[in-house]
Each structure stands twice: as C-alpha cells, then as structure tokens.
Image (spheres, rainbow, N blue to C red):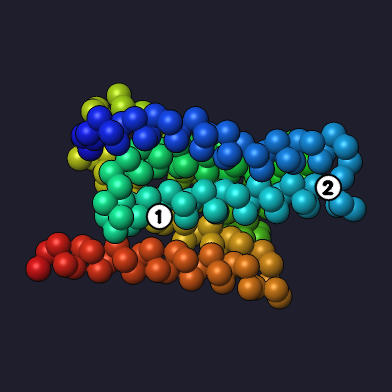
Amino acid sequence: MSLNPEDKTIAFVIKPILFTVCLVPFITLVIGAVNNTLGTNPVETMTHETGEWTLRFLLLTLMITPLRRLSGKSWLIKLRRMLGLYAFFYACLHFITYIWFDQYFDWMEVVRDIPKRPFITVGFTAFVLLIPLAVTSNNKMIRLLKKNWVKLHKLVYVIAVLGVLHFLWLVKADTLEPLIYASILLILLGYRAYYQRRKNI
C-alpha cells in the first residue's frame, strides 16, 4: 500500500518506539530470570508468559487491518509486519522454553509428547505454520509470491485459532483468560467475514 508523505513520517517515528515497547516483556523475563524473581516455578512462568505474548501479538497483528479501515489511518499498516514477527519471536521463545527446560532437548521425548497431549499438538502445529509466514514476511518474498503471498498469509487466522485452542486446552479449569482471547478473535474473524460479504455485494 502506497502511503502519503505524512503517513510515512508517522510510521517512521512510531516504528522504533513500538519495536522497543514490544521487547519489554522479553527484557522483563530476562531480568526476572537473572534476579530469580519469576516465582516458585520459573519455567512455568516463562512458558506461560511467552505463550501469552505470542497470542497477544497474533491478535494485535490481526487488529491492524480493521483499525486501519475504521480509523482511516493508513500508516497503521506499516506496523503489521513488525507485530507479526514479534509474534513469531515470542513463539520461538515459547517453544525453546519447552524443549530446553521442560524436555532437556530429549527430541525423542518431544516427538512422543506432541501427539500424546492435544494442547501440545495444536500448539506445535501453530508454531510450524508460523515459520513460512515469518520467512516470507520481507518485500522480496512479497514480490516473488505475488497473489500467493496473500493466500499464504491467510494462515494467520488458522494459527490464531490454534493458539487459542492451545491455551484453552492447557488451562482446563480456569478458562477466563483464554475465553477472553477467543472472544477477541471471534470479533476479528466476524469483522473480516462481514467486510468480505459487503465487498462482494
């Protein structure tokens, strides 16, 4: 999308600020790990926090297009790629925490664990689907894939659904938080369906 000079200036100013803000959860976890302030179960805290931030950044990424359409602020679209890559960054941290601190790099145990527990199955599937989106997020791949790029990146909706299911099946009893994320996702998917329907009328 082509932006006017004013929108380009706004995006140029906001992007480094947003980049720094998005790093805050990671820095907080690092400081907590160094100072031993992550609670009685640091591994569980790291796993939970990196997983939740992955989901938050996925939903923020999905919010950009509706916010741009509703507000008319075209510069918002320039933030979408960064938010998506941060979702992948925190997903990588989430996965690394699992294979390092939970499974101690016992790959055979990881292979056995993935199909055995449904919440890990959907979580791992979401992570695998995120990889091609991250790899193809640059301008070169957009030009190379053309219309196929748009089709490929629609996988983000599937990934978000799997992410919510992963969280919901993980917590089992206290489902308030995952249901809040599920509600936000439902609104975003509903808006997309509504917009597409109006567009096709």
- Tell me: residue 30, above or below residue 60: above
Q: Position of residue 172 (x, y in %)?
A: 68, 72
Name the residue tied to disc 1: 63
Amino acid at pointer 2: Leu
Q: Quadrant of residue 3?
A: top left
Is residue 122 or residue 115 the one in the foreground? 122
Name the spot of residue 151 as percent of width and height, x first.
27, 46
Q: Residue at x 34, y 69 (%)?
A: 190
SS under mark 1: helix
- Mark 1 / mark 2, whichever is N-terminal: 2
Residue at 39% across, 42% down:
80
The quadrant in which the N terminus is found is: top left
Residue occupying the point 89% across, 41% down: 36
Which image quadrant is residue 143 in? top left
Q: Quick one: SS at disc 2?
A: loop
Circle 2 is placed at which residue position?
38
